[in-house]
Amino acid sequence: MPVKVSVIVPVHNPGPFIEDCVASLLRQSMPPDAYEVIFVDDGSTDATPARLDALAAEDPRVRVIHQENSGWAGKPRNVGIDASRGEYVMFVDDDDHLGDEALERMYAYGIANDADVVVGKMAGKGRAVPVELFRANRPRAGVANAPLIDSLTPHKMVRRAFLDRIGLRFPEGRRRLEDHVFVTEAYLRAGNVSVLSDYVCYYHVRRDDASNISFRRFEPAGYFKNLREALDVVERYTGPGPLRDGLFRRWLRVEMVERLRGRRFLDLPEDYRRELFEEIHGVVVERFGPGVAAPLQPSQRVVAALVADGRYDDVVAFAEWEAGVGLAVDPEGVVWQDGVLRIAFAAELTHDGGPMTFPSAGGSPRWPPQDMAEAVRWLGADTVDRFDRTVPDLLLRERTSSAQYFQPAEVVRETVPAGDGSRVRLVLRATATVDPATAVSGGPPGEGLWDVWVRVGLGGWTKELRLGPAPRHHGRPAPPAGVVAGRVVLPYWTDRHASLALDVGHASKRLGLGRVSAGDVTVAEDRLRVVLPLYVPEATAVLLRLTGDRSGDLREVFGTLSPGGRLEAALPDTEPAGRTWLTTVCLTPDTDGARFHPLPFALHIAPDGVLVVPAPQPGGARHLAHGLRRAMYRALGRVTARGK
């Protein structure tokens, strides 16, 4: 079979952090003879070269190329491209890893859409990754109709023939932003770029030792010299006008303005801060016309204007002011309704711990601002003008992988008077819908723990916060677990952060089944009936298991769980008298790895019927005997003669 994909991994002293990468590459769902993995060892001095050579000796998919250290990842990637045999090449860093179906899905998507470049959804584990780009699949994307420019890391799948036809390779040597130069040209010259957003393909990982190259402090002069090379690519393949300005805006916003804001800027040493500011000022004055900064969000535009004017002290003062900006989120309701979980919340920006307020009256404060007070007034007025377009997002984020998914929401925007009425608060009230059948890109969430996050972009600040704290003071506990769409979904407030999370398929004790008492159970005409504290939107099959008091005794029978949590099942043959049977229930018998949950009652077969008694605790024979005696004296009215 021809090689479909060549995975190229530049390697330099990753130590144990390479193991997750290796494991993910070897367990890909793509047939083993359809892809290859090329590790390019860039002069590693740890045990990695021997580890990779041993791997290559065992697995025909793996090749290893050793070379002297080149100083950065550009040359190893180029060596891998030249050695590749695949129709597409996929670039992976040695401390990151892929989703199990990444290669298969990305290749199929690229072929289906005749894409020269395929961008797969990313999840950041301790690292920021693009969010807006992955709201939906984009089979035909370009820099003019999609925020492609937000994703300039090299972790893409690219058609090898396309690279050869245009002669595109990574800049080499010890330098920064080689990926920006490569990816920008690929975007601008590709016949088509496809964005796959319904599956997490790439996990971008911050190492526990925080030694990823991209996290090391850079030398400003060299960094912005390299950044100018990416701007050169844009100028080479676009003409003056809105498209070029929009592309340039990405570097102004991400690589310049954001580096000069809030605590990120203030926490730098003073001499480094000044050097960074001067280099950024030079690029802004030299390369960017007025159309680049004008569409920025308010706070970003303020910083850009101060930089253009060379006002270092004001940039520091503004950073000190906006270091106090935060987000407050108040959960207002979490309920099951019509088979979905509806989560209501309110969100607003804060400043120095209290609600942020804005000018209530219209007006056009002077631009550009002449001092800090003018800058804050202008920022407030412009933010109010944009408020009617602000939409908060609710995301489900899988706790282990950090994969996240947007949930649909309805929003109401409220302008609330503050103080004497000269200022207002901008409050967003939203109700998001989490459908267990479709919450993850149209499919159900996998088993595990999912945290609920709220994301708000307003005024040029993008803030994220877990939904909490738990509204205990409002008397609104989390709703019961739901048996919905073939899975058990338990909303709960976490113990540590008192924030909302969903347990999918893992919960046992938290389900609340222990609140059922033996007195809640009836047995009549060989049918067991009990109401469980569960949300059930429609009747579903469950599996009732009876485990006898003799080794190996086990009976199973299907029952029905109906709305209201009503469980009903016909009892299997449990003769002879004198036996006691513990009860457990599987709420999702059609699911792989489904769990049986213990019920807090047992069935004792008496000579003339069935007694429902408390289930014994582990090792609790005395407890069981006591329960049987109590049942004999107090629950004879619940005895039903079998067969009568």
Image: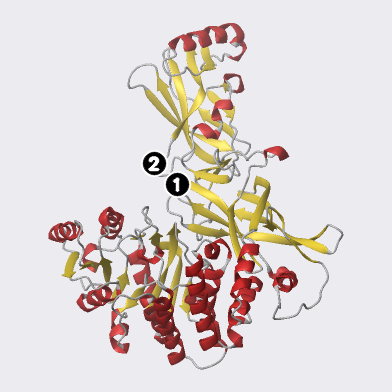
Given the image, on which type of amino acid does mark 1 rest?
Glu
Q: What numbered label is drawn on residue 421? A: none
The quarter in which the C terminus is drawn is top right
Report if residue 112 is visible in the image: no
Q: CA–CA distance between discs 2 and 1?
A: 10 Å
Query: If you read the primary sequence from the N terminus, does the residue marked by circle 2 or circle 1 appear first?
Result: 1
| Spot occupied by residue 329 in the image (x, y as percentages of width and height) | 66, 52
Q: Which quadrant would the N terminus be assigned to in this image? A: bottom left
Point out the residue furthest to the bottom here.
239
Point 59% across, 80% down: residue: 310
Location of residue 332 in the rendering, given as x and y in whole percent from the top left corner: 70, 48
**Residue marked by disc 1:** 447
> Which numbered disc covers residue 593?
2
User: Residue at position x 48%, y 8% from top?
Assistant: 625
How dense is the environment of label 2, judged by Cα within 10 Å: few (below 14), some, or many (20 and up)? few
157 relative to 454 in the view: left or right:
left
Q: Secondary structure at mark 1?
A: loop
Which kind of residue does numbered mark 2 sit on?
A: Gly
Taking the image as shown, residue 108 lies to the left or right of residue 577, namely left
For the residues labelled 2 and 1, say whether their Cβ atoms are less than 8 Å apart.
yes
Q: Name the outermost residue toward the right.
A: 420
Q: For numbered disc 2, what is the local secondary structure?
A: loop
Closer to us: 593 or 82: 82
Does the image show residue 488? Answer: yes
Q: With respect to residue 485, does 68 lie above or below?
A: below
